[in-house]
Amino acid sequence: MNVSILGVIPWQEMTGAGAANGKLYVVSTMMQRVYGQGAAMVITVLVMWTAFASVFSLTLGYSRVPYAAALDGNYFRAFARVHPVHRIPYVSVLALAAVAALFCFLRLADLIAALVGDPHPSAISGAGGGRDCAAHSASRDEAGRFGCGSIPCLP
């Protein structure tokens, strides 16, 4: 697929748009140049559909992690609640969906820096970021679980 895109859009145009922090929707631009505006609109809708489907599938899949931890007693009990009719961990799904919605308001560079623990989000360099909780400040509680303040860590 990359070869077919490069056959339509010169690589200089893509690198120039990326360096200028411009918006270049590569697949849509390729479809517009080859098949016209209608095909570009269709492919844009399909790309957006796929992005939403990806977020929904990840939210539904990852919602089982806090649910299972709550069932084991290692997380908030509210996350162990199951919908009476649909039998899904609805509190976990809603919490993860809310967090995902909040992430939509952040710049991608700031979000990545926050996730890797960089105290200076504007300078993503790999040095100084990504602190390992268990290695730096973790301590075990009376049950033998790790903890870093209010953030639970893996043993």
Image (cartoon, rainbow, N blue to C red):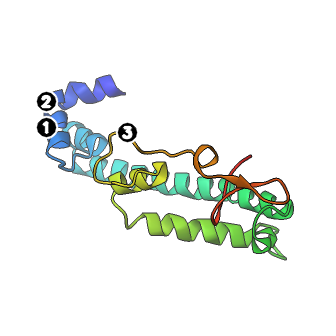
Image position of 13 with respect to 123: above or below: above
Q: Secondary structure at mark 2?
A: helix
Q: Are marks 1 and 3 in contact (CB under 8 Å)?
A: no
Q: Are marks 1 and 2 in contact (CB under 8 Å)?
A: yes
Amino acid at the residue labelled 3? Ala
Image position of 125 with respect to 21: above or below: above
Amino acid at the residue labelled 1? Gly
The residue singled out by tag 3 in the image is 127
The residue singled out by tag 2 in the image is 12
The residue singled out by tag 1 in the image is 16
| 58 vs 129, nearest the viewer | 129
Residue 115: % across, % down: 48, 52
- Mark closer to the observer (2, 3): 3
Residue at position x 38%, y 38% in the image: 126
| 145 vs 23, nearest the viewer | 145
Amino acid at the residue labelled 2? Gln
- 1 or 3: tag closer to the N-terminus: 1
